[in-house]
Amino acid sequence: MRVILLGPPGSGKGTQANLLQERFSIPKISTGDILRAAVSDGTDLGSQAKTYMDQGQLVPDEIVVGLIKERIKEPDCDNGFILDGFPRTIVQAEKLGEMLRSMGQDIDVVVDLEVGKDELLVRLTGRSTCKECGAMYHKTTHPPKVAGRCDACGGELYQRDDDNEETILKRLTVYKQQTEPLKNYYEKQGKLKTAPGRGTVDEIFSRVCEMVN
Ligand code: AP5
């Protein structure tokens, strides 16, 4: 099963991808996570990416396409994968299509999570993430039991550098201009399914599971 999760920043792609990878035992591949790990490791890739990420801009296509090309060849992707945050431009989608065709594979379904702007702002300005296991929390809707610590592993929680209002608004504009056209791109291929992204995490997960099954 090869799935793309599409949707604006804060629509719940990472949350749903974490649940899907557990349910279906296939890896989640998040370009955002890969890039943040490179930033935190202080690699050349990380320092190139950080400038774009801090401004809410997309990292250049050739960088992220190169990352995905390597990652989907790994043996744990043989039975499929969940793409979270990739592709984000038509060029990335075309390159992904070429890569998969050359491997005799294809995308099965693209799930678009639809959430309104006001809700996205609330979610992102209140989000914190575990440094160790990536679990996500929200200061009002899903606070950790102990402030600043992950319920699951006790790891330290942090707020992403790009989760401030100014950068979030920029990311939403970039999404509209560069990523939203992918809906039409995949709709024409008969692969797009739209999941209303409002509701509890579990409610949305049920909808997403129906769509990918
Ligand atoms: P990336 O890390 O992909 O960020 P994003 O797309 O902006 O999405 P987010 O991770 O912010 O949100 P999400 O949809 O995963 O929501 P989440 O589940 O966390 O990218 C970051 C940057 O990296 C980009 O700006 C770009 O610079 C670069 N980049 C990455 N990929 C790239 C690419 N392919 N090309 C070029 N550049 C790239 O949920 C958000 C919050 O809401 C959490 O607190 C969560 O607990 C809460 N929540 C989730 N579901 C619900 C619910 N149902 N109800 C209430 N709260 C909920």
Image (cartoon, rainbow, N blue to C red):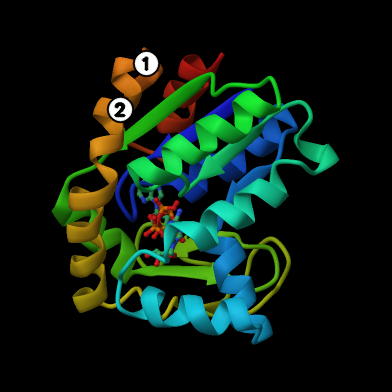
Question: Which residue does the image show at 44% across and 57% down from the upper left?
Answer: 61
Q: Quadrant of residue 141?
A: bottom left
Q: Residue at x 29, y 16 (%)?
A: 188
Q: Are marks 2 and 1 in contact (CB under 8 Å)?
A: yes
Residue 176 position, x and y percent, is: 19, 49
Residue 110 is at least partly visible in this image: yes
Towards the viewer: 79 or 21:
79
Q: CA distance from mark 2 to mark 1?
A: 7 Å
In the picture, which quadrant includes the N terminus?
top right
- Number of numbered discs: 2
Mark 2 near ligand 1 (CB under 8 Å)? no
Dot 1 falls on a residue whose secondary structure is loop
x and y, in percent, of residue 50 in the image: 46, 80
Horizontally, residue 184 falls left or right of residue 142, namely left
- Rendered location of residue 175, percent (x, y): 25, 53
Q: Is residue 180 left or right of residue 105?
A: left
In the rendered view, would you say 125 is above or below 112? Answer: below
Secondary structure of residue under mark 2: helix
Query: Alpha-carbon neighbours of circle 2 within 10 Å: few (<14), some, or many (≥20)?
Result: some
* Amino acid type for the residue under numbered disc 1: Gln
Asked whether 62 or 197 is in front, the reply is 62
Is residue 149 visible in the rendered image? The answer is no
Image disc number at residue 185: 2
**Which residue: 75% across, 36% down?**
77
In terms of image quarters, where does ligand 1 lie?
bottom left
**Residue that label 1 marks:** 189
Residue 179 location, x and y as percent?
29, 46
| Quadrant of the snapshot with the C terminus | top right
Classed neighbour count for the residue bearing mark 1: other residues with Cα under 10 Å, few (<14), some (14–19), many (≥20): few
Label 2 is placed on what type of residue? Tyr
Would you place residue 178 above or below residue 204 in this image?
Answer: below
Look at 41% across and 28% down and name the residue there: 111
